[in-house]
Amino acid sequence: MGTVAIGPMSFSVDVLAMLASILLATTVGNRVARARGAHADALLWMLIACALLAARAAYVLRYNDAYLGHPSSILDLRDGGWMGWVGVAAGVAVATWLGWRRPAQRPALAAATAAGLALWAGVALIAALQPKLEVGIPAVELTNLRGKPTQLQTFGGKPLVVNLWANWCPPCRREMPLLRDAQLRHAEVNFVFVNQMESSAAVRRYLEAPHIELDNVLLDQHSALSLAIRSQALPATLFFDARGRLVERRLGELSAASLAQRLARIVKVKASDNHMETQ
């Protein structure tokens, strides 16, 4: 559903909608239960836990290769890895089963499920109805490490990943090896690393210290690219298809799974475009 930036922090609209739905569902469910002289707290949280577990498990299974090397990363929910429709289906199934087993709590469970689903569906509908503006590669002037002016458009013609980062940003540093490995593995995708508001000397020192060898490192000393995408949050990663159209903007740290998910989208778009052109 996209992201929302508040100051230096970024939040997934999908995750915010999920949290709001949980809050509304528990509030409505508890009120209905109290009005009928029943207690439903434990059942409501069991329902929510099952739905969240199912949504996370489905995502992990879908991108299992990204988690096999580091199983502990399954517990790192910062990557925003959920399959919402699986969670919704699991939640409805569990609510139905609990309602059958606990008739006294059935109205509370039904009301909580309906309220949560209504809010979730409403946010999804609003997001879907937003006008889809086609955004291209920003026309901003950057420089390479030698001080030569460079345009991002020169990297077009293939799917393009543009990562905005800075030395002082811990999440930027954590995801850098992941992006470097992806650059080495995916020759069909151009990766560009745009440093924000730091000197060439500072960037060189950082890249040399941990021996991170990157291609296409550029400098944005006036934060022109951040201004163009209307976000000062770091890290930020832009995913463009082969025609230079922005497919997705990710604010916050990438995981192996969340990067694989987004790379699949832009490579799939490229394949689809090529197929259309041959018709």
Image (spheres, rainbow, N blue to C red):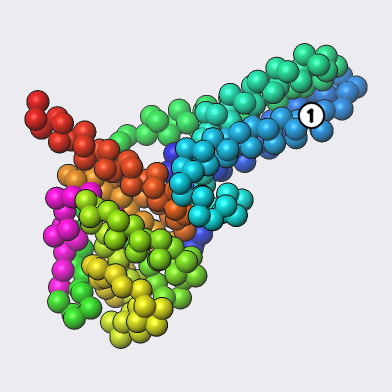
Furthest residue in direction right, as rendered: 37
Residue found at x 18% / y 50%:
158
x%, y% of residue 156? 16, 53
Identify the image quadrant of the N terminus.
top left
Furthest residue in direction front, as rendered: 69
Residue found at x 26% / y 62%:
192
| 2 vs 43: above or below | below
x%, y% of residue 148? 14, 76
Q: Residues within 10 Å of mark 1 (few under 14, many from 20)?
A: many
Q: Is residue 241 magenta?
A: no
Q: Quadrant of residue 194?
A: bottom left
Viewer can see residue 227? no
Viewer can see residue 257? yes
Q: In which quarter of the image is residue 149?
A: bottom left
Identify the image quadrant of the C terminus.
top left
x%, y% of residue 119? 58, 29
x%, y% of residue 143? 20, 73
Q: In this view, does 95 lie to the left or right of 200?
A: right
Q: Which amino acid does label 1 sit on?
A: Leu
**Residue holding disc 1:** 43
Residue found at x 83% / y 24%:
33
Q: Is residue 164 left or right of residue 121?
A: left
Q: Is residue 38 left or right of residue 88?
A: right
| 132 vs 195: above or below | above
Q: Find numbered disc 1 in the image and state the secondary structure of the residue it sits on.
A: helix
| 194 vs 82: above or below | below
Task: Please report the bounds of the magenta region as a residue range.
Answer: 149-162
Q: How many labels does the image show?
A: 1
| 130 vs 104: above or below | below
Q: Is residue 159 magenta?
A: yes
Residue found at x 75% / y 35%:
45
